[in-house]
Amino acid sequence: MSRIGKKPVELLIGIKAALHKATGVDGSLLTMEGPKGKLQTQIPSEVQLVLKDNRITLSVKDSGDKKLRAFHGLYRALVQNMVVGVSQGYEKRLEIMGVGFRAKLEGKDLLLSLGYSHLIRYPLPLGITAKLENKDTIIILNGADKQVIGNTAATIRSYYPPEPYKGKGVKYANEVIRRKKGKRVA
């Protein structure tokens, strides 16, 4: 049995959770609503989910199957991420390093000036908000869905990943870039 999967997920005050029968697929649909938004996830039929007394417990049909034991921990972690997302939300910080490298918000689009001959227009996904700080070189992404926040940050970073010689590019705020020496003239 999964060590993570055995732990119950506590629903915080102000969070509404509901379990519905999913249409067209085998399993159920878990929806959560809180102050930061509404999320839903598909739960396969091999994983049983019980909502009782502001507590969600998960179990699997066959604890001897290795794949199902992995599902047990995975779906418990996904449910916990949903609870944190709808109650507190998630945040990712990106730093833009380089001369003339900037970001700008235009409606729901993020415009990135990363040293190319053109601006990069990135439309923010639904439920994601962005804020700029420090003369438009720090991007703060906020949202309820941890996976969407991570994918958004990774996509923005992929436009110009940090390079090791001068450190130019888009990096995560807590990321450490190992710097290399340039050419040595003899």
Image: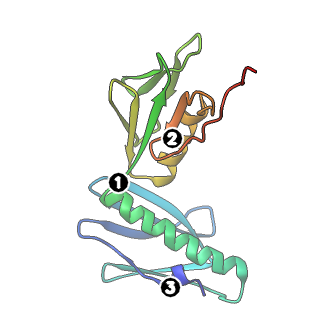
Q: Which residue is drawn at 63% across and 29% down?
A: 165
Residue under the point 57% across and 37% down: 155
**Nearest to the observer: residue 131 or residue 179:** 179
Badge 1 local density, few (<14 within 10 Å), some, or many (20+)? many
Q: Residue furthest left?
A: 13
Horizontal placement of 39 versus 75: left or right? left
Q: Going 76% across and 21% down the picture, which residue do you hit?
A: 186
Residue 150 image offset from top left, x and y in percent: 51, 48
- Residue type at the position of mark 1: Gly
Closer to the chain start, of discs 2 and 1, is 1
Report the amino acid beneath label 3: Lys
Compare residues 53 and 164 and report the one nearer the observer. 164
Question: Which numbered circle lies on residue 89?
Answer: 1
Rendering quarter of residue 173? top left
Residue at mark 2: 153
**Residue 118, image x, y percentages:** 56, 12
**Image x and y of residue 43, in percent:** 55, 69
Residue labelled with disc 3? 6
